[in-house]
Amino acid sequence: MGKKGKKEKKVKGAEKTAAKMEKKVSKRAKKEEEDLEALIAEFQTLDAKKTQIIETACPPPSPRLNASLSAHPERDELILFGGEYFNGQKTFLYNELYFYNIRKNSWSKVDIPSPPPRRCAHQAAAVPQGGGQLWIFGGEFASPNGEQFYHYKDLWVLHLATRTWEQIKVTGGPAGRSGHRMVACKRQLIVFGGFHESARDYVYYNDVYAFNLDAFTWTKLSPSGTGPAPRSGCQMATTPEGNVIVYGGYSKQRIKKDVDKGTLHTDMFLLKAEGAGKEEDKWVWNRLSPSGVKPTPRSGFSVAIAPNNRSLLFGGVHDEEEEESIEGDFFGDIYFYDMGKNRWFPGQLKGPKSEKKKRRRGKKAEGEGAGEGEAESQPPQGPMEVIKEVVAEDGTVMTIKQVVSAPEVEPERSEDEDEEEAEEEASGQQVEPCPRSNAMLAVKHGILYVYGGMFEVGDRQFTLNDLYALDLHKMEDWKVLVEMDPKTQEWLEESESDEEGDDVEGAEGGEEEEESSEEESEDEEEVEQHPSVQHDEKYTDYLPRTEQYWLKLARHNMGPDAKEKKVVKLAHAMAKTFYEDSV
């Protein structure tokens, strides 16, 4: 009894501390949010000038992260909303609405009157009712200098059939937050976790709310059992039975004044509705102990629901802060969680099968049937972890880890056949998304789509706007739908701040990238003429850290018909020039 009593007191004490912190954060954040409300109101005034629905064909959206990408429930389309972009000096927030036509591989921007205010780190859920609806909840708005935050607690619905926005104004919902997760579960939206941050304080949540899509009412759930600790950025998925799975996430605690300790969560829970639909207001938390190969600890990963009763996890980053360096491990791997078997396993690509290879194997089938049988009988090899690490002159450590499938065991071939196959596969070796965090995912007809996100090199952030697709049924190879545009890569040092426009223009976003594209293209031309850089080992050592990135930039700059040696030479030159400027 004594131990139990102490444990209960400890739990109650932790709850009181969390409540005090939430009250403290709320008080301090109120003043900041009042300041930002004026800026948000100014943007809404601009949006109010839109009086009609205008759809225009457009190039791919500008680079961004922490947006939402959703599969249209009725059409072969993806819907992109919101997001953020940081250029080294200013934070840009968006409330643009884009539609991606899967069949035509084309983008269109749709301006609709009275949209939600600009935001990022919100959540979106698409449901088929009423001709298709896209629900948006929460998220945050940041001041252009990134030092003040406004956390939304509003709920919006985009009626896809009529293309109209509607704000659902009902009480009893969650407090303002970002980094939370929201899923559609039967006729409800389930919201869990997230965080609220002011300039000096923060609080993480582990509460659960349900929004009834029929009655338009919020209900705060009080599940029995021991649930997850407060966190943001977790994986959340619904099962066919109407239960909710929560995995991982991130949180931090203040261990002493001005010192915070971050935690990468790797635990897993099931939020189960009891009563088989008769008593849906009764929920219970159960801790799960899945088998298989689990994802390595990380934050900033992206999630989606895959075919065959599976959820998937893509990318992310593992940051470790030490006294003299910040080590960032970015990932580009995929993990599947089988909800029926309670098992994790890494996604392994089988690789593309060219027609020549099929014909070659067909010719060998008659004479070498026994040899091929032996090869097929060998057990499949497990995934391999590729690690790339570099230490810059300023002490910054950058590590990229990626799990790739092991090569298939094949019968021996002649040198001519090897050369033929090498030529066939040379152009496709790098067709995969580079490691990244905070990307946007959506699955439609069993195809996974990955858009945007970011990765870091030293103190510089690279924000992406590429689009990839992977058939989750075949798991053969990635398809590049939209290549990364190097002209959109802009990074401004602090010393250039005097050249920028006002805060309102910066927060609008999208314009500065276009203005600087001409200057950047001139810089790239100068880099191409850099002499003998392939022999400078000091800078080629940096290349493996983001080899894929530099090679893509070089190929884009020189065109698809350029010789590989010249592409590599330009990639080295670009890497050298970048690190000379940054170090």
Image (cartoon, rainbow, N blue to C red):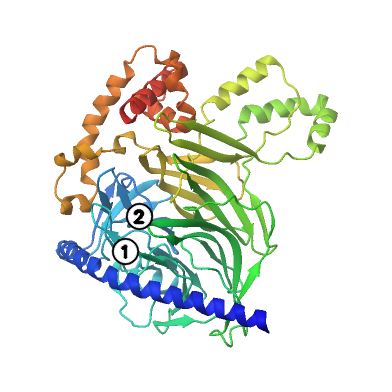
Picture layout, residue 566 above or below residue 53: above
First along the sequence among labels 2 and 1: 2
Confirm whether residue 187 shows in the render.
Answer: no
Left or right of 323 on screen, residue 366 = right
Picture layout, residue 330 above or below residue 111: above
Tell me the quarter of the image containing the N terminus: bottom right
Q: Secondary structure at mark 2?
A: strand
Residue 99 badge: 2
Left or right of 350 on screen, residue 373 = right
x, y (%) of residue 314?
53, 50
x, y (%) of residue 154?
32, 72
x, y (%) of residue 150?
28, 65
Q: Going 18% across and 41% down the picture, which residue do you hit?
A: 497
x, y (%) of residue 151?
32, 66
Kind of residue at badge 2:
Phe
Label 2 to label 1: alpha-carbon separation: 34 Å
Left or right of 27 on screen, residue 272 = right
Q: Nearer the viewer, residue 107 or 114?
A: 114
How crowded is the residue under tag 1: few (<14 C-alpha within 10 Å), some, or many (20+)? many
Which residue corresponds to mark 1?
198
Q: Secondary structure at mark 1?
A: loop
